[in-house]
Amino acid sequence: MAVLVTGGAGYIGSHMVLALLDAGHDRVVVLDDLSTGFDWALPPEVELVVGDVADQALVAETIRRHGIDALAHFAARIVVPDSVADPLGYYFANTVKTRALIETAVREGVRHVIFSSTAAVYGEPDVVPVPEDLVAAPINPYGRSKLMSEWMIADAAKAHGFTYVILRYFNVAGADPRGRTGQSTPNATHLIKVATQAALGQRSHLDVYGTDYPTPDGSCLRDYIQVSDLADAHRVALDHLRNGGESLTMNCGYGQGYSVLEVIDVVKRVSGRDFEVRLCPRRPGDPARIVAQADRIRNLGWTPRHADLDGIVAQALAWEDALTKRNRL
């Protein structure tokens, strides 16, 4: 049995590959168009197929050649403000292409699907921490594109008999504690990455979008989950499905919220460096606060090992330093 990881050369996908290998899953194949991923982020023993998830002939051939029984689908566009500016591009990349991928998986007999979704499907939740059974009400095209994909996967599973786990991520941060991979995309918008770059002098300043939200300090409140813990949640989900478990939708977070300004203070303290922070107006599509209720994934046996914001920031700083040295070579 082999696992196909789409977007596996990207930030979260490459950590999933490492989590699978570390757990003894030696048959892992990656499909990535390398638009935001990097071939060097993958261990040499992992086969990389360069291509698009909507290339049905390529996907079908890959599934047949490797005997793929499980699909972990990470490939997507993920920047909320970009989705507001380019909604059709997001519906195409995240929804239309996912439909093509799932259709191919069904035709080729893939038995299990793990889907990378997002807390953005909840929109502006009136319950915090957010339970999975809260009615989804996304407020931006990114969240809507992911929710549409969730619906498609659930409907297709009922019709065609495969099982799935949908994982709704909160804010992903940090890097592999062993320094093997991390967030490497140029001009990434993740807060902790941007803040660590500012601390290291790679950016002239950091913009904070909105300080008038109904939160304790006026800035947005988020649940930050360390990326290796998130990848391990996917591994737990895969084991659940392969052991005959039912289809599930689950949150991935720690249940602890930090504001944007709090995160900036932690980055300054951990790095020992100050940097300019500019207060800007709100961006469209940003909810005020969102924190996970994540009992379901914990009940499957998932135990976070890196739920410490100082440690997450230290990992991000170390990865930025390593990435700078790599780029100089």
Image: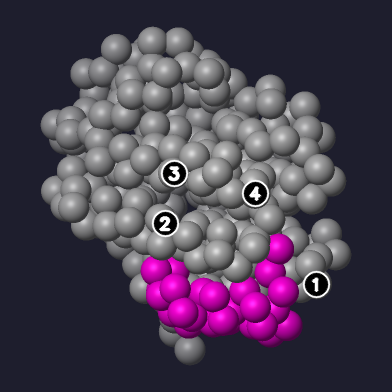
Q: Which residue is mark 3?
A: 152
- Who comes first in sequence, dot 3 or dot 2? 2
Q: Secondary structure at mark 3?
A: helix
Q: Residue furthest bottom?
A: 329
Q: Are marks 3 and 2 in contact (CB under 8 Å)?
A: yes
Q: Mark 3, residues whose alpha carbon is within 10 Å: few (<14), some, or many (≥20)?
A: some
Residues at marks 3 and 2, CA–CA distance in whole angstroms:
9 Å
Q: What label does residue 329 carry, if any? A: none
Report if residue 106 is visible in the image. yes
Residues at marks 4 and 3, CA–CA distance in whole angstroms:
13 Å
Q: Which residue is mark 1?
A: 26
Given this view, does label 3 or label 2 mark the residue nearer the observer? 3
In x, y percent, where is residue 218?
29, 18
Residues at marks 2 and 1, CA–CA distance in whole angstroms:
26 Å
Q: Residue drawn at (77%, 38%), measured in percent from left and top? A: 245
Q: Residue drawn at (51%, 46%), measured in percent from left and top? A: 156
Q: What label does residue 162 carry, if any? A: 4
Given this view, does label 4 or label 1 mark the residue nearer the observer? 4
Q: Tag 4: residue type?
A: Phe
Relative to residue 251, is residue 241 drawn left or right? right
Q: Secondary structure at mark 2?
A: helix
- Who comes first in sequence, dot 2 or dot 4? 2
Q: Tag 2: residue type?
A: Thr
Given this view, does label 2 or label 4 mark the residue nearer the observer? 4
